[in-house]
Amino acid sequence: MAKITFRDPITKSLIMEHEIQKWHFSQETEFQQVDVFESVEFGMTLALGGVVNVTERDEVGYHEMLAHVPLLSHPDPKRVLIIGGGDGGTLREVVKHSCVEEAVMVEIDEVVVNVCKEYLPECASAFDHEKANLIIGDGLKYVEEAESESFDIILVDSTDPVDAAVELFTESFYKECHRVLKPGGVLVPQSDAVFHYGKRVHDIVKKLRNIYDSVDCYLSFVTGYPSGVWTFSYASKGGHPTEQIDEARFKEIEPTLKYYSTDLHRAAFVLPKSYQRCIEEGVEVGKG
């Protein structure tokens, strides 16, 4: 019997092929193609628009670093806004913090939420949490209509800048986020892989630096993503993300963590020289 496979396009000339044990779900929604399958190497896997988005085996490297780096750098985050994040992993991490009073999550595709509740329940475990406020709708529109200085932290847990997510990578969107953030607030969008998409990361950082007081990139290992090294951009209306890390709050949530630590928090901002040059100057890794 022929093997069932899923071909994940890393770039136009590079593909990661997953051998599949079982295909669980496939549907084209109003917004994107949604697939869920069980990968031999990565376990239960969510693919959006034909691209791997979440895997059971390595999702913590993405979700814990997207959430806890900004949350533990902020002295008292009470309201957190998540744009996207339909799998629920980022929300799961945000509500762990005792100081958070409300976590608003705006996801455009309800199908993603529903399939993750069924097939990725460990990711989707916080949708019914008392602090969670799930809104099915357009994240860009939500930010545009939100009150000024109404959130402490905004996390952009989107797909790559294609299709419905394109508008979440524009300077105008980042300006709206700046307006919505309180003094000292933090915006962290996922920013793609420097090795394969360096120009994209460079452009994101350049746009953010036109608006925010402090902008730095940090890295995490997410093996199922292109190159296995993922980038987040930390844009702050306050100080640097390693100046003040809430060690007491970290100790409260440490037993629940599988990836993040405060040592890793600090180390994540130390980038290889070629990565740093790519982010600062737009020179592709290994090509200049």
Image: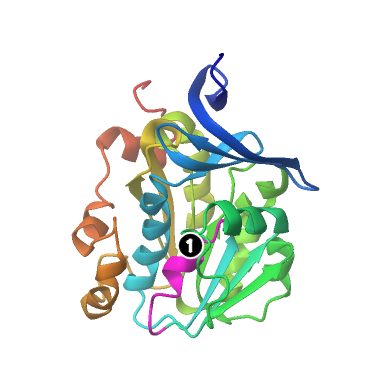
Crowdedness near tag 1: few (<14), some (14–19) or many (≥20) residues, C-alpha within 10 Å: many
Q: Please tell me whether residue 97 is drawn above or below residue 8 in the rendered image.
A: below
* Residue farthest front in this picture: 1
Residue found farthest to the top: 1
Q: Provide residue 268's location: percent of width, then percent of height.
A: 27, 52
* Whether residue 109 can be seen here: no
The image position of residue 177, as x and y in percent, is: 59, 67
Residue 193 in the magenta stretch? The answer is: no
Q: Which scheme is used to colour this image of the protein?
A: rainbow
Amino acid found under the numbered disc labelled 1: Thr
Q: Quadrant of residue 228?
A: top left
- Camera-side residue: 264 or 122? 122
Residue 236, image x, y percentages: 43, 67
Q: Secondary structure at mark 1?
A: helix
Most extreme residue toward the left is: 263
- Quadrant in which the N terminus appears: top right
The quadrant the C terminus occupies is top left
**Camera-side residue: 83 or 120?**
120
The residue depicted at 37 percent of the width and 59 percent of the height is 64
Q: Residue at x 44, y 34 (%)?
A: 282
Is residue 96 shown in magenta?
yes
Residue located 26% across and 36% down the image: 273
Q: Is residue 42 placed above or below 106 in the rendered structure?
A: above
Whole-percent x, y for residue 257 in the image: 30, 63
Residue under pointer 1: 90
* Vertical placement of residue 128 versus 120, above or below: below
Q: Which residues are magenta?
A: 87-99
Horizontally, is 278 left or right of 242 in the view? right
